[in-house]
């Protein structure tokens, strides 16, 4: 997940990658206050973990979209012949249910990423002096 903050000097977005799902784990990984360098103005400043917000990962959206756009027609292509050979309506419904697999994977990936971002953004750490 990418977490972002604004540079103290030029207000440019600074993003870093983390596996942490909340601020507590993020603080354990990086420390409560840690130094980052802005790529635009080259300013090094200390940032508290509460200054960061999580944004949905665009790579997860891309991967989920590719799975949806490629897997759905591919499965449809493979089950096309079976649909017209079957005479029993329940079998047809079951075969068409296979098309829901890519849709389900797409939804689960996006929901998981959204839940991680919401979890991170809801937690706050107490700032000590």
Image: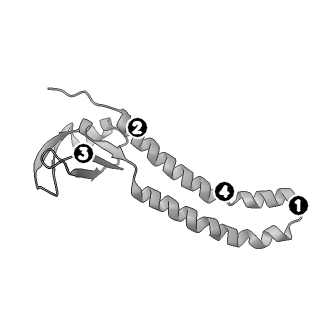
Which label number is shown at residue 88?
A: 1
Q: How is the image coloured?
A: one colour
Tell me the residue at 40%/49% (across/down). 56
Q: Residues within 10 Å of mark 1 (few under 14, many from 20)?
A: few
Q: Residues within 10 Å of mark 3 (few under 14, many from 20)?
A: some
- In the image, taking residue 75 as reference, residue 87 lies left or right, namely right
- In the image, taking residue 96 as reference, residue 65 lies left or right, namely left
Which label number is shown at residue 5?
A: 3
SS at circle 1: loop
Residue behind mark 2: 119
Q: CA distance from mark 1 to mark 4?
A: 20 Å
Q: Farthest right residue?
A: 87
- In the image, taking residue 71 as reference, residue 14 lies left or right, namely left
Q: Residue 65 location in percent, x, y?
A: 51, 61
Mark toward the start of the polypeptide (3 vs 1)? 3
Q: Residue 95 location in percent, x, y?
A: 76, 61
Tell me the residue at 24%/45% (across/down). 5
SS at circle 4: helix
Q: Are the residues tagged 3 and 1 within 8 Å (C-beta)?
A: no
Q: CA distance from mark 4 to mark 3?
A: 38 Å
Mark toward the start of the polypeptide (1 vs 4)? 1
Which label number is shown at residue 100?
A: 4
Q: CA distance from mark 2 to mark 4?
A: 28 Å
SS at circle 2: helix
Q: Residue 13 location in percent, x, y?
A: 24, 51
Which label number is shown at residue 65?
A: none
Q: Residue 82 location in percent, x, y?
A: 79, 70
Asked where in the image residue 79 lies, by quadrant, the reply is bottom right
Q: Residues within 10 Å of mark 4 (few under 14, many from 20)?
A: some
Q: CA distance from mark 2 to mark 3?
A: 17 Å
């Amino acid at each position: 997940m990418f977490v972002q903050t604004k540079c103290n000097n030029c207000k440019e977005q600074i993003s870093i990658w983390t596996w942490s799902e909340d601020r507590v784990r993020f603080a354990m990984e990086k420390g409560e206050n840690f130094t980052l360098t802005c790529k635009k103005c080259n300013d090094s400043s200390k940032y508290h973990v509460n200054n960061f917000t999580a944004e949905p990962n665009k790579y997860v959206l891309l991967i989920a979209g590719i799975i949806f756009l490629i897997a759905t027609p591919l499965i449809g292509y493979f089950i096309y012949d079976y649909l017209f050979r079957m005479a029993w309506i329940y079998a047809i419904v079951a075969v068409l249910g296979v098309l829901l697999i890519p849709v389900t994977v797409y939804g689960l990936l996006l929901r998981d990423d959204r839940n991680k971002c919401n979890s991170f953004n809801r937690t706050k750490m107490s700032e000590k002096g």
